Image (spheres, helix red, strand yellow):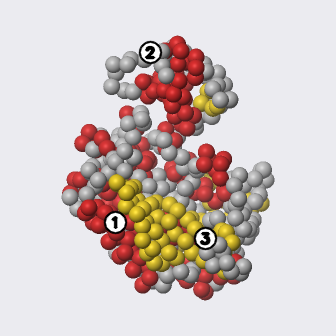
Amino acid sequence: MKLQLDTSNKTPVFQQIVDQIHFAINTGELSPGDKLPSIRTIASKNGLAINTVAKALRQLEFRGVIEARDRSAFIVSQKSDISRYQARGVSSDKTEVHHVVDNLDSGIFPHAFCKITEDYLGGDPEKCNVIHADGSGTKSIIAYLHYKETGDPTVFHGIAQDSIVMNLDDLLCVGVKGRILISNTINRNALNCGGDVVAALIEGSEQFLAELRHWGVNIFPGGGETADVGDLTGTVIVDTCAVSVMRKSEVITGEQIKPGLAIVGLSSTGQASYEQKENSGIGSNGLTSARHDMLSRYYAEIYPESYDANVSENLIYCGPYRLEDPIPNSTLSAGEALLSPTRSYAPVVYKLLEICPDQIAGFIHCSGGAQTKCLKFGQQVHFIKDNLFPTPAVFSAIQKASGTEWKEMYQVFNMGHRMEIYCPQTAVDEVISIANSFRIDARQIGHTETSSQAGNHLSLHHENHVFEY
């Protein structure tokens, strides 16, 4: 394969390398298993710096279209299911991260949903510490677009909630129900996001924490940091860190997720008794794809600071919608659906742990990895999800706009339920009743069996298809 590089082209040279090699793979000029020339060889033949070529090949490796064989040699990947999500520089399962962290100390309960350590804060041998960090991700960029279009900074109230919930609901999965202390970090480009954005984020955080405390969740602000980092972001990034102390005897260790359990899903849509408006169900995962697949080219032209110029142009804001446009089969506009604040299930989980704690084998928050998140928990478990909720309108709109395969949709988006409760079949009705008392729809979406394969296995039923993961 010969590269045709044009240094006068507005497209950076490394991106030209990425595009041409990816195109050669897609068209069959390069076949699975073919070896690429070394980084040094490509650089020498084309008069390029080694770092330029290395950067291009790293991006192709992240997309999954090539695989490293040693420090400088790559082959065309044997895989054929490269996703749109991965092509945009994001990963639904963070495989490359797990390659590193899976070899680190996994804490005192290695199968738990969150890492749990000894009580380094208090020194009590009967207690443990749980600390968690996450954020609202690229959902903040959609809020930024809305803010720029309307001048309304209060849209960031929901982003503050998103960042908090992505931590809080992970903590719920290990049984945290005591005091939680949080700290927020806001990284912004001060030229694009003024003080009104920072004020709205702080105000939104304080309001949401007060609402949670009203519903019995003992969560409190512990300060934070605001940094002006225009070199790192064109818009704004909102992250949160949460910490709690709990008794070791109360930890949900994850070891009870076994064959023979029912799986109850809690709907991500509708309006819970503790919510102020209808929830589309979008959550805070998959928003890179949702943003680009739903929103029109208009936003790329007007707000170039809102996307990564390294990503192929045909994957940037390639959808049919403006923020104010309605989406089919919904009362919400595209902007309202994509910005719908991430629902916390804390009031429901607290009630479950109060009324029937002995019936709960485990919780799984379907965040990164979405409906395949369960594969990380239990041993030799076959997860069968054969009674899922109907696909919410926002996800149907994303799928139709993008043409994304349904199998990938379930790996990126929650698709209708974002919290799973694993319990005996005899407890299903009580779990559903408790969820319903908060006006949250719930149903048994599946069950677990012993896996006949090596490791865990998921069979997910969608219409007339069964997807295997």
Disc 2: which residue? 4
Pointers 1 and 2 in contact (C-beta within 8 Å): no
- Label 1 vs 2, first from the N-terminus: 2
How many C-alpha atoms fall within 10 Å of the one at disc 2: few (<14), some, or many (≥20)? few
216 in relation to 223, above or below: below
95 in relation to 381, above or below: above
Mark 1 element type: helix
Nearer the observer: mark 1 or 2; the answer is 1
- Label 3 vs 1, first from the N-terminus: 3
| Residue 201: numbered disc | 1
Image spot of residue 446 (x, y percent): 63, 64
Nearer the observer: mark 2 or 3; the answer is 3
How many C-alpha atoms fall within 10 Å of the one at disc 1: few (<14), some, or many (≥20)? many
The residue depicted at 51 percent of the width and 31 percent of the height is 55
Q: Which residue occupies the foreground of this view, 87 or 458?
A: 87
Q: Is residue 329 left or right of residue 262?
A: left
How many C-alpha atoms fall within 10 Å of the one at disc 3: few (<14), some, or many (≥20)? many
Tell me how far mark 2 sits from mark 3, CA to CA. Answer: 53 Å
Quadrant into which the N terminus falls: top right
The residue depicted at 41 percent of the width and 52 percent of the height is 138
Identity, as a three-letter code, of the amino acid under mark 3: Val
Q: How many marks?
A: 3
